[in-house]
């Protein structure tokens, strides 16, 4: 997707673009302020389903970044929006934390382990073998399998932790059922974000730090894409992919003048 005129709306990833290890990256505060000053609708996106927008807004504030709760879009919120479209007022057995359970409650879903319409798997820091066993049995009994995001590991101070994608693979092995992943790289995540701010793909840009999630999903959703080099992807790694972002920038600081 090529470079277009000045975008009217912006989507931006959080980790690796605005923050890294709880510290704001250079230019992030100024970029966010420019969006506010120019009255550009925007959302900060994350595949992490553990935290609520309020939790994440507080985390960003501690890093010196001001992002209001309504401007944060998580894979949990995208999952709740997807399920509401699929089956309004349905029921779900959930493996996850407050970010996911709160999103589903607010979407009008009933959380239950008795004959749920869906099993919804999200991120949690304490996966329970008992909960995973229950999920397997419910899926075999007919519940449809949904997962917030396909990330196989997550970061921690001690090293990588197994994440949603890894646990989903275990459930798939036991049931023979593949989950529907709502979060990146599914462009569904971006389309639901566009709906949230009443934006059009033709006038929206996505800023991310990963080719295999942010950029590919942005391209598939019809967005202009910007890859920044402050996160997971180096210049050399870009050449491994058969697609290209619209722009490659050293950091979010270089995007300020594009707003």
Image: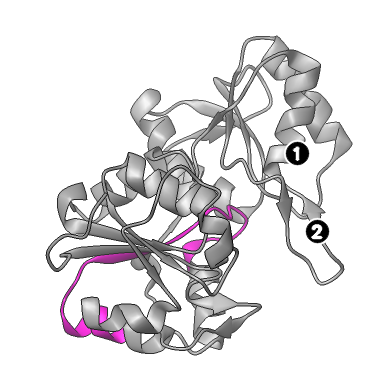
Residue drawn at point x = 51 percent, y = 53 percent: 239
Give the image quarter of residue 84: top left
Mark 2 burial class by Cα count in 10 Å: few <14, some 14-19, many 20+? few
**Residue 241, image x, y percentages:** 51, 46
Residue at 37% across, 56% down: 245
- Is residue 2 highlighted in magenta? no
Residue where numbered disc 2 is placed = 160
Q: Position of residue 252 (x, y in %)?
A: 40, 78
Colour scheme of the rendered structure: one colour
Nearer to us in this view, 1 or 71: 1
Closer-to-camera residue (256/179): 256
Residue at the left extreme, as displayed? 5
Location of residue 105 in the rendering, given as x and y in whole percent from the top left corner: 49, 44
Residue beneath disc 1: 166
Picture residue at 67% right of the left edge, 21% below the top = 114
Nearer-the-camera pick, 2 or 252: 2
Quick check: marks 1 and 2 in contact, CB under 8 Å? no
Judged from the image, the secondary structure of the residue bearing numbered disc 1 is helix
Q: Which quarter of the picture shows residue 55?
A: bottom right
In the rendered image of this protein, does residue 152 appear above or below residue 237?
Answer: above
Residue 243 visible in the current orientation: yes
Mark 1 surroundings: few (<14), some (14-19) or many (≥20) residues within 10 A: some
Total marks drawn?
A: 2
Question: Is residue 66 visible to us here?
Answer: no
Q: Residue at x 53, y 70 (%)?
A: 56
**Reading the chain from its start, which is encountered first: label 1 or label 2?**
2
Task: Estimate the x, y position of residue 64 in percent, counting from the top left.
Answer: 49, 90
For the record, the magenta segment spans 32-53
Q: CA distance from mark 1 to mark 2?
A: 12 Å
Residue farthest toward the top in the current orientation of the protein = 141
- Quadrant placement of the C terminus: bottom left
Answer above or below: position of 31 versus 182. Answer: below
């Amino acid at each position: 997707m090529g470079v277009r005129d000045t975008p009217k709306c912006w989507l931006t990833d959080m980790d690796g673009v605005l923050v890294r290890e709880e510290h704001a990256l250079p230019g992030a505060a100024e970029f966010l302020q420019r969006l506010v000053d120019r009255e550009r609708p925007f959302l900060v996106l994350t595949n992490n389903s553990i935290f609520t927008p309020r939790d994440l807004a507080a985390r960003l504030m501690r890093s010196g970044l001001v992002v209001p709760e309504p401007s944060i879009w998580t894979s949990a919120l995208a999952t709740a929006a997807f399920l509401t479209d699929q089956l309004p007022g349905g029921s779900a057995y959930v493996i996850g934390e407050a970010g996911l359970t709160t999103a589903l409650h607010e979407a009008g879903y009933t959380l239950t382990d008795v004959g749920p319409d869906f099993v919804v798997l999200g991120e949690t820091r304490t996966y329970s073998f008992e909960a995973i066993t229950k999920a397997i049995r419910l899926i075999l009994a007919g519940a449809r399998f949904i997962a917030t995001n396909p990330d196989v590991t997550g970061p921690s101070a001690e090293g990588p932790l197994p994440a949603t994608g890894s646990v989903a693979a275990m459930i798939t092995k036991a049931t023979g059922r593949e989950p529907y992943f709502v979060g990146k790289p599914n462009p569904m995540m971006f389309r639901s974000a566009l709906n949230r701010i009443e934006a059009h793909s033709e006038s929206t840009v996505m800023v991310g730090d990963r080719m295999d999630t942010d950029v590919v999903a942005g391209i598939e959703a019809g967005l202009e894409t910007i890859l920044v080099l402050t996160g997971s992807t180096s210049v050399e790694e870009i050449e491994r992919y058969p697609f290209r972002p619209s722009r490659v920038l050293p950091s979010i600081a270089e995007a300020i003048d594009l707003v």
